[in-house]
């Protein structure tokens, strides 16, 4: 199955007017899942990558698979209060209010080349906060890889403006 | 590095007297991560597995890697209210009160052979609820694979009493 066709759209979720792009149907399909992982790493063939950073929670599934494919380590970017050791924290803006993500203070070593993975980029706020966190830890963020880009929300451009290479496998218009 | 040595212990987290077993240091180590995935699937060599079920949130990281290693699909077992499509839900007991996990109603097909993956088994309450959910969906739960077994809490035995094969790579005494 084509990667885009394997994504289920749920209208009016979580609220009216939102077309929710559900990747669980893609992950459940062995062939589509494997082709997705292959496609996420393809643009980075030949690049040195030391670690994959997955963004909680769906980015953990894809990031775990991508780290395994690349034979590198994995570091979790988590919602506030979920990590047990000393953390670095970064706030980012939501439609109403702010939220916070964290990494362990020793999650990345200075100079390590890190690839950020998540299922979807919308406004790019979470991924931008992840880039900032990893740079504060001294890491070199070599790219952000997403399955879905909601391109009208401008997240990919926002990340490219930070000097980060952005890969997205499929695009959807609208929210 | 040995798998057990790659796990960090954080004393008195999240509360006094608890020795928290932190697998993020294991996941960050490329060699230890790969050996962990290999060891999780080794007891199932030759068994037919159609899908891996990962338990939110750390089970997503390991489950994503295990599904990739086995070239099968992945299904998320999530906390209540996180899945966008129609769900099946199962309650389980906590020290105080109850919690609920969910799967999508179409996450597993009748007769599918499913391997449950999580980082750690303590009392086994969450994994038991996952077994029940998957069986309600008609799936055949072929096993539960964990990195850590807190053996004094009896979770592995509780799961074996359900007729499920349990694999755990390392054991720790106490809580």
Image (cartoon, coloured by chain):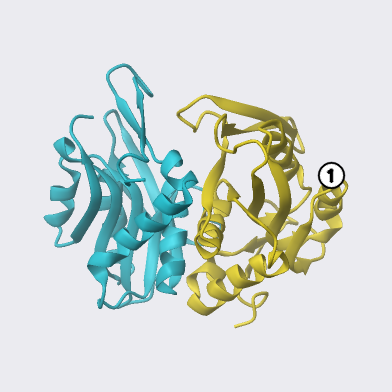
Chain colours: A yellow, B cyan
Image quadrant of residue A41? bottom right
**Residue appearing at x 15%, y 58% in the figure:** B162
Instruction: State the image coordinates of residue B50 (x, y, percent, origin top left).
Output: 36, 75
Quarter of the rendering occupied by the C terminus of chain A: bottom right
A62 displayed left or right of A165: left
Number of numbered tags placed on the structure image: 1
Q: Residue furthest top?
A: B16
**Residue receiving disc 1:** A162
**Residue appearing at x 68%, y 68% in the figure:** A45
Front one among B102 and A171: A171
Let me know if residue B57 appears in the view.
no
Let me know if residue B140 appears in the view.
yes
Image quadrant of residue B73? bottom left
B69 displayed left or right of A49: left
* 10 Å crowding of disc 1: few (<14), some (14-19), many (20+): few
Q: Residue furthest bottom?
A: A1
Local SS, label 1: loop
Instruction: State the image coordinates of residue A85 (x, y, percent, origin top left).
Output: 47, 27
């Amino acid at each position: 199955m084509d990667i885009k066709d394997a994504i289920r759209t749920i209208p009016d979720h979580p609220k009216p007017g939102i077309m929710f792009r559900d990747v669980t149907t893609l992950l459940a399909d062995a062939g589509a899942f494997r082709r997705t992982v292959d496609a996420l790493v393809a643009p980075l063939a030949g690049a040195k990558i030391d670690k994959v950073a997955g963004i909680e929670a769906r980015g953990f599934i894809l990031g775990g698979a991508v780290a395994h494919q690349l034979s590198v380590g994995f570091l979790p970017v988590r919602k506030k209060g979920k990590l047990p050791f000393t953390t670095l924290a970064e706030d980012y803006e939501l439609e109403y209010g702010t939220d916070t993500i964290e990494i362990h203070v020793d999650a990345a070593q200075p100079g390590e080349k890190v690839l950020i993975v998540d299922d979807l980029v919308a406004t790019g706020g979470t991924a931008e906060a992840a880039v900032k966190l990893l740079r504060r830890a001294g890491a070199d963020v070599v790219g952000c890889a997403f399955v879905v880009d909601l391109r009208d929300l401008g997240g990919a451009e926002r990340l490219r403006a930070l000097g980060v290479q952005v890969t997205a496998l499929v695009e959807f218009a609208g929210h």
